[in-house]
Structure formats: structure tokens, C-alpha cells
Amino acid sequence: DADVTQTPRNRITKTGKRIMLECSQTKGHDRMYWYRQDPGLGLRLIYYSFDVKDINKGEISDGYSVSRQAQAKFSLSLESAIPNQTALYFCATSGDRGTVTLINEQFFGPGTRLTVL
Amino acid sequence: GNSVTQMEGPVTLSEEAFLTINCTYTATGYPSLFWYVQYPGEGLQLLLKATKADDKGSNKGFEATYRKETTSFHLEKGSVQVSDSAVYFCALYGSGNTGKLIFGQGTTLQVKP
């Protein structure tokens, strides 16, 4: 079974709709992240969470919100989707114990392709 | 702030050709450097990493050396295969434990038989 799972894998929605993307992990990691990928722009960080009570904005958080329901679950919401939020969204995790190298390495889910019409 | 710049793609090579994908960075202190690979339809996977100057990361025939004097971490492979076709991302993790990876824009590699 995959260590980091994302649901749904694909979603088409309309402008103005509320959308939730979900991420679950079985790696036992404390740190979780949401990124979006756009062609030519690489990955950009939306939100990140170092534990259940610690949530931080990334570089492009406007129009998004998150919820860390448990150590293993981190959801991303688009309250009112717009077409320029069409992108590939990735969840990632990393540990916070052990060597610095272990903290640095992030493990990614398979991605959710979101299309907003 | 921290940033990563990769060579633009796509890069198209014939099988068994030599590969170089350039990556340079801007960062304060001593960042850790990574190459991630994204195969079609999949998420990113860590390919290799280096945590201090002059370290060489290697995996699956790929290598990259952390060059602090030139702020570079170029990815190389001596003989590419069709199965290496993917998008490659250079990334850095800044010193100070900010918890954030900074990614380059990605370079698409296409290897033809």
C-alpha cells in the first residue's frame, strides 16, 4: 500500500464550487505539506503543518484553506474554486525526528489533478 | 530569499547519450540539495541528495556534486535509458530548519530509442 495517498485523483468542477482534497499518510510523520504544480513553475507551497496544532501559510495560500484533522490526515479546501486554480496538487510528508537529513526528505503522494471550468 | 534555477527543457536525447541538467541555487548558509524525479502520472520521488559542500549524491546511475563555490548541483548520467524519461526537479532545503523545500521549475527529459 502507498505511504501517502490522495483523494480524489482527478476532479473536474465549476467556478464557485467548494472543493476538498484529502491526504492520508501511514509513515507516522508529523510534518505535512500541500503543493501545487503548474507547467514551467515547478512546485509551489500552499500550506504546511508541523503537527496537529501547527499550521502555516506557504507562498501561495490565498484562496485555499487547510485542516489537520489528525496526525495522519491533512485536507486542502478551495472555498470558491476559480479557473486559475486548475493544477496538479501534491501532498507530502516528512519526519521531524532523527538527523537533519531525515527531516529534509519529503515523501509525495501521487497527486490530484483538479480542473476548474 | 532562497531560490533554485534549472535549465529549461525539454531535453531530448538518444538512448545511451550523456545527460547533464544544470541547477544553480541562491541561499544563505549551508542548504541541503536534492534532485527529485517525477515519472508520468506519478508523484515526486527523491532521486539523490547532498547535505554539505563537495558531497556527491548518487542513485540509479545519476550523480550530482554539491559545489558551494559555484552554487551548483548539476545532475549527470553517463548513459540514459528510455525509462529515464521524466521530469527532474532540483530543490533546496535552507539552513535554519524552516521546514520548506524550494523547487526549481523542473526539466523534462525525453529519451528516444
Image (cartoon, coloured by chain):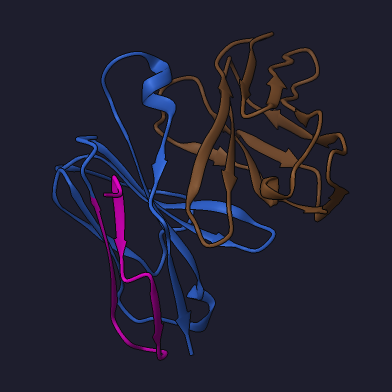
Chain colours: A blue, B brown
Range drawn in magenta: A1-24
Which residue shows up at 43% across the image and 27% down it?
A104
Q: In this orientation, which residue lies closer to the viewer: A103 or B75?
A: B75
The N terminus of chain B: image quadrant: top right
In this picture, is A86 found above or below B94?
below
Question: Does the image show residue B105?
Answer: no
Residue B21 position, x and y percent, is 79, 37
**Residue for point 87% across, 48% down:** B14
Q: Which of the two residues, B95 or B43, is positioned nearer the viewer here?
A: B43
Q: Position of residue A65 (x, y in %)?
A: 29, 63
Number of numbered discs visible in the structure rendering = 0
Left or right of residue B19: residue A89 = left
Q: Is residue A69 above or below residue A12?
A: above
Name the image quarter holding residue A74: bottom left
Which one is in front, A51 or A99? A99
Magenta segment: does it hold A22? yes
